[in-house]
Image (cartoon, rainbow, N blue to C red):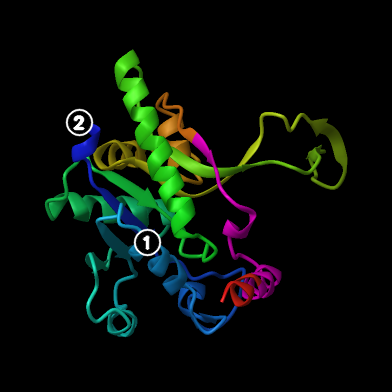
Amino acid sequence: MATISKRCHAVLPSAGMGVRLGGDQPKQFRHLAGKPMLLYALDAFFRCPEVNSVWIGMSPGSNPLIHDLKSRYPNPTKRFEFLETGGPTRQQTVLNTLAAMLDLGVDPYDWVLVHDAARPGITPELIVRLITLVKAQEQVDDQQQALQSGGLLAMPVADTMKETTQDAMRSQTTIDRSRLWQAQTPQMFPLQVLHDALDQAIRDGANITDEASAIERLGGQPLLVEGATRNFKVTHPADWDLMELVLSERR
């Protein structure tokens, strides 16, 4: 299928509890710098003309939260779906959401951009950069009849990296960082390809921590597109405080 006919869909798995951050509700719904953290990512995707729809994978029984979020977008500019597809792990939530999208008629050749709701520092410019470069690379790969396997935002590692002893208490060796990148999101792959890769990885009991790792284990080589420091993941209380500063400055 020609690249130009493939649409782009944002997928935000939002079923996690954010245990390491603490609090009495899932972190993606807690107010950060004036509004629920999830809304920063939603706003970024809504501002991208290249993104045709946005899909949120929620935990079963999330109706009150869904109603509150929908009320903030009374006249959405693109298809906007909340699905109760949350699973026991992030990977299962993504797989369940992709399966629901296929059942609802989304073209299996379309692109999906899976993004962590806990990365509110994402911007429309970063999303467009990823889409543009991955689509350009697909055209090159098609000409070379090579495997086309999408791409992801990531950052070259800047700090010195250490491997620990077995007890993780002491430094054992220094790792060459010249080929190390820190993965971010969104991560962009064809819908059916990613669905099948995640399904196989979960069935095999593989240790996959992001979408790219599921693609890699089947031989794919996702394109690395440089992201931004501000697109870090909010995991611990210190991350929350830092992101609040970042978002407040931007506003």
Callout 1: helix, strand or loop? helix
Q: Residue at x 36, y 64 (%)?
A: 47
**Nearer-the-camera pick, 81 or 65:** 81
Residue position for label 2: 2
Q: Is residue 87 above or below residue 200?
A: below
Relative to 213, 238 lies left or right: right
**Nearer-the-camera pick, 83 or 202:** 83
Residue 29 image-quadrant placement = bottom left
Q: Residue at x 54, y 69 (%)?
A: 18
Residue 131 image-quadrant placement = top left
Residue position for label 1: 45
Q: Residue at x 34, y 56 (%)?
A: 11
* Residue 81 placement (x, y as % from top left): 23, 67
Q: What's under tag 2, amino acid-wise?
A: Ala
* Residue 52 placement (x, y as % from top left): 24, 56
* Residue 63 placement (x, y as % from top left): 27, 81
Q: What's under tag 1, amino acid-wise?
A: Phe
* Residue 207 placement (x, y as % from top left): 50, 41
The stretch in magenta equals 224-245
